[in-house]
Amino acid sequence: MRRVDLRSDTLTKPSEAMRKAMLQAPVGDDVYLEDPTILALEEKAADLLGMESALFVSSGTMGNLIAAYLHAPRGTEVLMHERAHTYRTELSGISAVAGAKPLLASGDRGILKREALEPLMNKRAIYYMERTSAIFIENTHNFCGGSVWNALELVEIADFAREHKLALHMDGARLFNASVASGMSAKEIVKDCHSVTFCLSKGLGAPVGSILAGDRDFVYEARRTRKMLGGGMRQAGMLAAAGIYALDHNIDRLAEDHQHAQFLAKAAKENPIFTQVIEPETNILFLHTDRPAVQIVEKLAQRGIAVLSLDAHTIRFVTHLDVSTVDINYVSEVLRELK
Ligand SMILES: *Cc1c(COP(=O)(O)O)cnc(C)c1O
């Protein structure tokens, strides 16, 4: 039986060519700033983002945590969407380590609009209320179905952040999916952000690692914070080499993953057991069903297809590098005929 794993784009395995690049990478002690491959990755990432500087971190979670630690003094609030990854699935590091509190806002597709944020700021002038220090936005927005911020939405949030003197951090775990889908360069997308993280270990296909970028002073402090958290690395150029390979080879092809998600959506629409098909903007597809989601997940598992139930009636499919068009055709067929 064919096996197709659509639980997450973190499941990709390094290709032969990527492994070869890893084996051949020159390395050194990165705590001493002597790993040439890590330094090359950081420079390449900063260039791609149009930021002064970048730091290789072990995960997106660590990048976001360091950003929170630096942008949000203890006891302050970080404004974010109620379905933000930083709120739901990062073990409350913002509170537990950075000492800040998430302030939650709602918004369609994970997009934060002024109307929803303004009322949350009104109380700020009162001396016994918390201060808000930062806004975290997510692009693409994972738990809102891989949605993408458009240029106007980004300008609006940047203006809002400026007016309220808030640091603006983008959790861009799938920043390049956002870039490929919107046609905006990564530079354009992040130009008004003080900091940004993106993951090398998701659709880009590297086995480990994320980037945290910002201005030179921010990244200097981020490097100190990473070390404090135990995230200093030694001869990790072998990992950075995978990151460089991913940036060189696996960005443009994300369009294929997006197309695959659309094929799946089209198939699901032909089956009435899926009561709502959320139109995929990138590589994430949400299907709603009146049945218990776990029941559908189990039926798909019996056909060799692994997916996740996100809540009682929602199923998430994530397309990625290791899923071929033949795989997608197979899954589409199963989605059409599932009873
Ligand atoms: C995966 C993800 C992260 C965290 O990345 P890890 O490398 O798994 O720690 C952060 N934000 C979003 C939106 C994600 O999807």
Image (cartoon, helix red, strand yellow):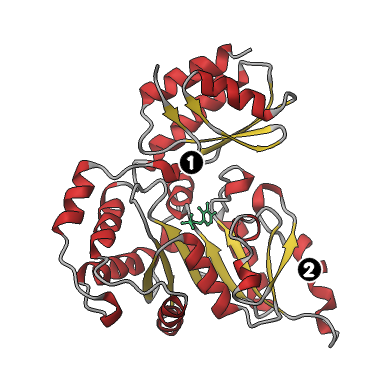
Tell me if 133 is positioned left or right of 124 in this view: left
Is 58 situated left or right of 291 in this image?
left
Count of marks, rendered view: 2
Asked which secondary structure carries label 2, the reply is helix
Residue drawn at x 54%, y 55% as measured from the top left: 139
**In the displayed structure, would residue 301 be above or below residue 286?**
above
Label 1, ligand 1: CB separation under 8 Å: yes
Residue 193 in sight from this viewpoint: no
Q: Residues within 10 Å of mark 1 (few under 14, many from 20)?
A: some
Identify the image quadrant of the C terminus. top right
Sequence-first tag of 1 and 2? 1
Residue located 15% across and 66% down the image: 26
Image coords of residue 146 (percent x, y): 56, 45
* Crowd tier of the residue under label 2, counting other residues whose Cα lies within 10 Å: few below 14, some 14–19, many 20 or above: few
- Spatial distance from mark 1 to mark 2, Cα to Cα? 35 Å
Quadrant where the image shows the N terminus:
top left
- Residue under label 2, please give it: 118
In the rendered image, is residue 18 in sight?
yes
**Would you place residue 271 above or below residue 69 in this image?**
above
Q: Which residue is mark 1?
A: 8
Kindly identify the residue that appears in the image at 62 percent across and 70 percent down: 94
Q: Amino acid at mark 1?
A: Ser
